[in-house]
Image: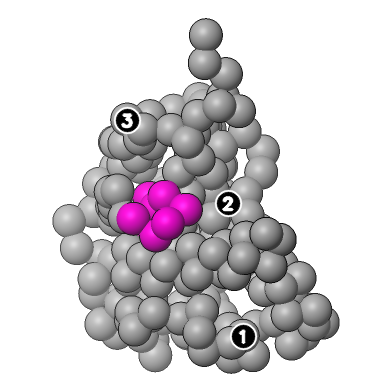
Amino acid sequence: MMRDTDKTEIYVSTDVETDGPIPGPHSMLSIGCAAYLADKTLIGTFSANLETLPGASGHPRTMAWWQTQQPAWEACRKDCLPPEQAMRDCLDWLRQLPGVPVFVAFPVTFDFMFVQWYLFKFTGSSPFAHSGIDLRTLGMALTNSTWQRSTKSHLPERWFDPLPHTHVALDDALEQGAMFCNMLAELRCKNS
């Protein structure tokens, strides 16, 4: 019998776009997931735009920021699905991955909070248990730096592939997933 610890880890780089800082009072507008093997093989993607939650509203600061990101705003408001359908589709996609899905994000706390809340609220379950990998923390450890010096602008150029960061969820998930694989390769090289 194969145990979960024997299965291939699938690194699910995830990015969400929202209209506020926390789920419930505010809505997840879009989710993008890019599933990578450790060697940076992209094995699949998922994305969906979501209708806003009933009774929720945009946070004034977040909505002011969206005013500066018109192309991304327009992209995340096209073809919106009810949250129930979007999260069922997401969970179905996650379950068909050929291994154990591991949540990866930059920052993990923000994206994970929304995805976990939405998965439990609309599907009753999540394949991610209660954890994920934070790229900023990994960057801090790999560079032996401080938290303040582990933002993307301070991280080594060699970790970044020439992929766009557009604030369109799937674009950003792809960019961050490739970055994670580059960081993981360097970590494994240092430890070998």
Nearer to the camera, 135 or 75: 135
Q: Earlier in the sequence, mark 3 or mark 1?
A: 3
- How many discs appear? 3
Please name the amino acid that badge 1 sits on: Leu
Secondary structure beneath dot 2 equals helix
Look at mark 1 in the image and give the residue it sits on: 155
> Does 135 lie within the magenta span?
no
Please name the amino acid that badge 2 sits on: Phe
User: Image quadrant of residue 20?
Assistant: bottom right
Question: Residue, x 50% and y 40% (percent of image)?
Answer: 9
Please name the amino acid that badge 3 sits on: Gln
| Residue 143 on image: x %, y % | 73, 80
Look at mark 3 in the image and give the residue it sits on: 96
| Residue 160 on image: x %, y % | 46, 81
Q: Which residue extends farthest left?
A: 79
Q: Is residue 137 left or right of residue 90?
A: right
